[in-house]
Image (cartoon, rainbow, N blue to C red):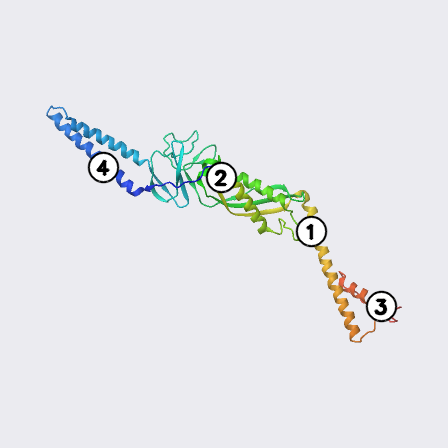
Amino acid sequence: MTTEKKAHAASGWLMLCVTVLAYIWSVYVFVTAAMGVDSYDEMGLDAPGSLVAMMVTSIVIFIAATFLSKGFFSLQPGQARICVLFGKYVGTVRDDGLRWANPLYARSLGRSSDALDDGSSVGARSLGGRKHGSIISTRARTLNGDRLKVNDKMGNPIEIATVVVWHVEDTAKAVFDVDDYESFVSMQTETALRHVASVYAYDHMEDDEADSSSITLRSNIEEVGETLKAELDRRLAPAGVTVDDARLTHLAYAPEIAQAMLRRQQAEAVIAARKKIVEGAVSMVDMALTQLSDDGVVEFDEDRKAVMASNLMVVLCGESDAQPVLNAGSLYQ
């Protein structure tokens, strides 16, 4: 596997001054030689070899300056340039600003049928509908994944989607070890999301302590996000990509079971509420009977306690208001 190496690129401003001076010097020498040739032509003499040499030298200097000007490029913060010399990876330049490097470095790592033949553009080019060029971005990017229909750990069909923040850490791996790192990130994100969704259940299915402590997709968003991030880091490492964050953006049951699961959740909510009501009612009945007995207000035998507990439970647990009935006789009539 390819590993990123740092390449040195000289300051472009110094080379710009050298190139401009070379252009000026070539023009000056050529004009001086041309004026000398015109003077000899007026006298009917052949131009001496020195003037011809000066003209040839000026042309050579002009060609050299033109060649040197091909080495200029600029990088913004968060960009890097891949330097390739005759098919061999030389290194990566990450220094921003105006830079100058070997003009023989490939300006495009790939080109499509509609790319320019002279290769003058140092920006990203299109190769089969994808970006591919000598300058790539190392800035953070966001991948908003599509909604996927997968099965959770319990086999229930669910809809799930994620958003991933990532950036290129190793430019050499991103360019040379995978064919298209952007498509690679997209496909591996979908694969990792399907895998994580199959590891965890959507929600707790039972009301026991062991199941309630397990990690689920709905109840443990942070833990699931960390697991997804670790899975993506492992899968995207060959492409030199690092994941900064991964979070679920959508989570729901599939439409075909959504109604059934909604009824189950409603039933669980009703059962939980009833349980709380009964627990509270029992506590209140016990407190009432104990206090009445301790204060000597009423002497209860077992039958009276049962009747009093029954009446209090009806009043406390009933969904409608209790209608009192006055008993004019004894308690047992």
In the rendered structure, the answer to whether residue 265 lies left or right of residue 175 reads: right
Q: Is residue 233 left or right of residue 217?
A: left
Classify mark 3: helix, strand or loop.
Answer: helix
Where is residue 294? Give x, y as percent. 78, 74
Mark number displayed over residue 265 = 1
| C-alpha span from label 1 to label 2 | 43 Å
Labels 4 and 3 touching (C-beta < 8 A) = no
Looking at the picture, does residue 254 appear above or below residue 34?
Answer: below
Q: State the separation of the CA atoms marked 2 and 4.
A: 47 Å
Q: Which residue in the structure is indicated by mark 4? A: 24
Dot 1, how many residues are within 10 Å of its Cα: few (below 14), some (14-19), or many (20+)? some
C-alpha separation, residue under disc 3 versus residue under disc 1: 40 Å
Which of pointers 2 and 4 lies earlier in the amino acid sequence? 4
Residue at numbered disc 3: 302
4 or 1: tag closer to the N-terminus: 4
Q: What whole-number distance in Å separates the C-alpha atoms at marks 3 and 2?
A: 78 Å
Q: 215 or 6, which lies in front?
A: 6
Q: Residue furthest bottom?
A: 296
Q: Is residue 162 above or below residue 84?
A: below
65 and 228: which is toward the camera: 228
Bin the neighbour count of mark 4 within 10 Å (Cα to Cα): few under 14, some 14-19, many 20 and up: some
Q: Position of residue 181 (x, y in %)?
A: 49, 38
